[in-house]
Amino acid sequence: MRFSKETLITGFAIFSLFFGAGNLILPPYLGYLAGTNWLWVSLGFCLSAVLIPLLGIFAHARLQGSMLDFGNKIHPVFSIIFCVLVYLVAITLPAPRTASVTYEMAIQPYFEVSSLTSSAVYFGLVLLFALNRSRLLNALGKYLTPLLLLILTTIICIAIFAELPPATASQLESPLTSGLLEGYQTFDAIGAIVIGAVVIISLNLVNTESHQIKRNLMIKAGSLAGLGLLTIYLGLIYVGSLYVNQTVTDSRTDLLSFLSYDTLGSGGRILLSILVSLACFTTAVGIVTGTSDFIKGLFKNSQRAYIITAILASALGVLIGQTGVAYIIAVAVPALSFIYPLVIVLILLNLFSDRFVSSLIFRLVALVTIVFSIPDFLVSFNAENYQGRFSWIPFSDYGVGWILPVVITFIIGKIIEHFIDESKTSKPEN
């Protein structure tokens, strides 16, 4: 597969929009917990943090519209509610988390600056990029992503070739599902449908090519970004597993700081600070831009609505960012347990043509997804009171009780459609 300059720039931009705080701090700690089972945990993590997001970009490439298109086949009102929920989650959880991670790892250790001041400057720059969105893909793809990849690759390569004791057994009871659920915390499935819309609008601003050419461009660029994510995740998880006997920590950020110091020396922490700032910043820009694009579309492409939304989203990021990384991750678990399955299902359904997946299938599968996500939501929200009550649902103990009901519903829906089509064709003409 040959990549043009535009494809490379767009692919790097998609990678940088995806690669934020969670993508950086979660994989090493996951490997640290997995130990010798790092491959199993990598498989689960990459399913939810690479494959599903990549399919989300492919779905956007097919639709070539806005995020509203993901739910329109269910009902336009449902689509608006779904989009509002997704963007609300995006601007209240992953966006503020990027500011918190940046402060805890890149600002607080070196400067006597308050979290509020740091977040204000941070989201001020995010707002500046969001308001100059016509240059967004070019800036991210040409400059920020290559620097990000260079620092990450350096840390991974030095750690891999270091002389370390053999890793011990996993601390995780189920490495595969642990990796899958930890992948939720990257927000990348949500990021795919938010970022995909940003990429489409950005391409339309500078590219007047046909629908098919832009579709092929997005597929190639998305594949390149997915390959980059896969490589970096595998490297970070593996490196984390190598350090399982080196240190004991309950903090994801502390482990990452330890890794950077051990591989790159005293200068490693400075490089890590740059890395964290870049990774977090690009994701925050994507979220604020995507949310502003959505509201602009609801208000008949009003530029005023775009600017007001960007300002409010940035202000909200400053305020929520004061709560800290650990608190934001804890709050995110219940929210993701409910919304993530629906996002995944809508991504998968929108990959198929309208002839294969009808509105009936969309409605049935979405309804069952919502119903069977509620038990996982209740358990994650209040595990002590609800643990064991939903054990009759297959895989519910692993936090993915929605999967089998959704698959069965899809099959039943196709069978119903088959009989409906047969009955129509068998009716004699008057």
Image (spheres, rainbow, N blue to C red):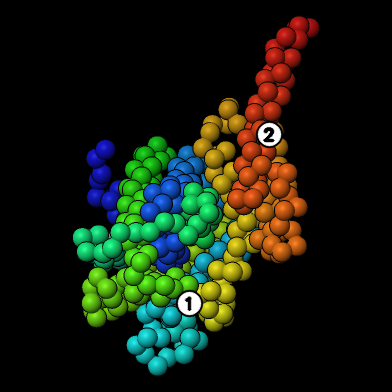
> Which of the 4 quarters of the picture holds residue 395?
top right
Three-letter amino acid code of the residue under disc 1: Ser
**Which label number is shown at residue 100?**
1
User: What is the residue that sits farthest to the bottom in this orientation?
Assistant: 112
Which residue type does callout 2 highlight? Thr
Q: Which residue does the image show at 52% across and 46% down from the upper left?
A: 65
The quadrant of the picture occupied by the N terminus is top left
Residue at image coords 68%, 29% = 413
| Tally of marks | 2
- Helix, strand or loop status at disc 1: helix
Q: Position of residue 85 (x, y in %)?
A: 64, 59
Residue drawn at (72%, 20%) of the image: 420
- Image height of 220 relative to 359, above or below: below
Q: Which mark sits nearer the N-terminus, 1 or 2?
A: 1
Instruction: Residue 334: tell me if it is visible.
Output: yes
User: Looking at the image, which is closer to me, 284 or 337?
Assistant: 337
Q: In which quadrant of the rendered view does residue 285 lie?
A: bottom left
Indicate which disc residue 401 carries: none
Q: Residues within 10 Å of mark 1 (few under 14, many from 20)?
A: many
Callout 2: few (<14), some (14-19), or many (20+) C-alpha neighbours within 10 Å?
A: some
* Residue 68 percent across, percent down from the top left: 60, 49
> Contact (CB < 8 A) between labels 1 and 2?
no
- Quadrant that contains the C terminus: top right
Q: Examine the rendered structure and indicate whether residue 43 appears above or below residue 12.
A: above
Left-right relation of 208 to 119: left
Return the mark for residue 409. 2
Q: What separation in Å lies between label 1 and label 2 (alpha carbons)? A: 41 Å
| Rendering coords of residue 390 (x, y %) | 73, 49
Of residue 48 and residue 35, the one placed in the foreground of this image is 35
Q: Secondary structure at mark 2?
A: helix
